[in-house]
Image: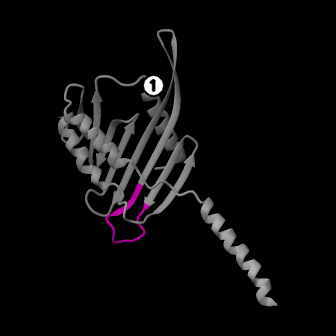
């Protein structure tokens, strides 16, 4: 008699567990870091006239073609698709945060963080009002070996700044999108207020 009473309960528990598993939405395991670096690398490889990259350590400017090689080199520090990570996802209003953490102490990668910020900026220019949506992405990679810290900021799919340990590179370009600097200031202000980084 006990066997027959337990059987429906067991089926119900199994079905419930299966439904919970089915409803779980997996977090996207693609960071787009490597793809972004390689895309800009290809764009910059043949460009020299539209801007320069300033190295704050050497106090010198790099051509876009020379800097493209640095982007190509750091593209390999993306997460490994064959490895398993502890993934944490948070939302802070306009900011989405995803962190991939290496569960073992032996791995070279300690953590990989991606922040995605989206906002709408309204501006007036020559009597006309403009409304633009902007997307800014920050990557922060922390490793146990050199390079130990890589930080990359992409604004509207364009390079803005890169730090590799104690060396910082900033883009100096002839023109910028209208409103992009306001979006950047809003993002930085939110980061400071929420103490996300």
Determine the residue positioned at 56% across, 46% down.
92
Q: Position of residue 139 (x, y in %)?
A: 39, 48
Q: Residue at x 53, y 58 (%)?
A: 26
The answer to whether residue 10 is left or right of residue 184 is right
Q: Nearer the viewer, residue 36 or 168?
A: 36
Identified at 73% across, 73% down, the residue is 12
Give the residue number, with chain letter if any, for mark 1: 179
- Magenta stretch contains residue 104: yes
Left or right? Give the position of 111 relative to 58.
Answer: right
Magenta stretch bounds = 101-112
Q: Callout 1: few (<14), some (14-19), or many (20+) C-alpha neighbours within 10 Å? A: some
**186 inside magenta stretch:** no
Quadrant of the rendered structure where residue 18 is?
bottom right
Give the left or right position of residue 37, taking residue 97 as reference.
Answer: left
Q: Which x, y percent locates residue 126?
A: 47, 9
Look at 18% across and 41% down and name the residue there. 58
> Quarter-wise, where is residue 84 in the image?
bottom left
Residue 159 location, x and y as percent? 33, 36
Q: Residue furthest right?
A: 1
Under tag 1, what secondary structure? loop
Q: Is residue 187 left or right of residue 59?
A: right
Q: Quadrant of the N terminus?
A: bottom right
Residue lying furthest top: 127
Q: Quadrant of residue 145?
A: bottom left
Q: Can residue 61 be seen in the rendering of this structure? A: no
Residue 52 appears at what percent x and percent y?
Answer: 23, 31
The residue at the far bottom in this view is 1
């Amino acid at each position: 008699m006990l066997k027959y009473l337990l059987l429906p309960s067991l089926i119900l528990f199994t079905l419930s567990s299966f439904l919970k598993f089915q409803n779980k939405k997996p977090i996207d395991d693609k960071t787009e870091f490597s793809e972004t670096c390689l895309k800009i690398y290809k764009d910059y490889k043949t460009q020299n006239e539209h801007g320069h990259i300033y190295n704050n350590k050497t106090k010198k400017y790099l051509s876009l073609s020379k800097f493209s090689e640095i982007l190509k080199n750091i593209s390999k520090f993306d997460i490994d698709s064959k490895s398993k990570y502890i993934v944490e996802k948070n939302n802070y209003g306009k900011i989405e945060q995803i962190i991939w953490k290496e569960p073992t102490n032996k791995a070279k990668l300690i953590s990989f963080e991606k922040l995605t910020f989206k906002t709408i900026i309204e501006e007036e220019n020559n009597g006309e009002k403009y409304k633009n949506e902007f997307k800014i992405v920050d990557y922060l990679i922390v490793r146990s070996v050199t390079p130990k810290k890589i930080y990359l900021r992409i604004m509207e799919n364009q390079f803005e700044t890169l730090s590799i340990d104690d060396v910082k590179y900033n883009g100096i370009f002839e023109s910028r999108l209208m409103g992009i600097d306001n979006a950047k200031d809003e993002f930085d202000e939110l980061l400071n207020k929420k103490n996300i980084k």
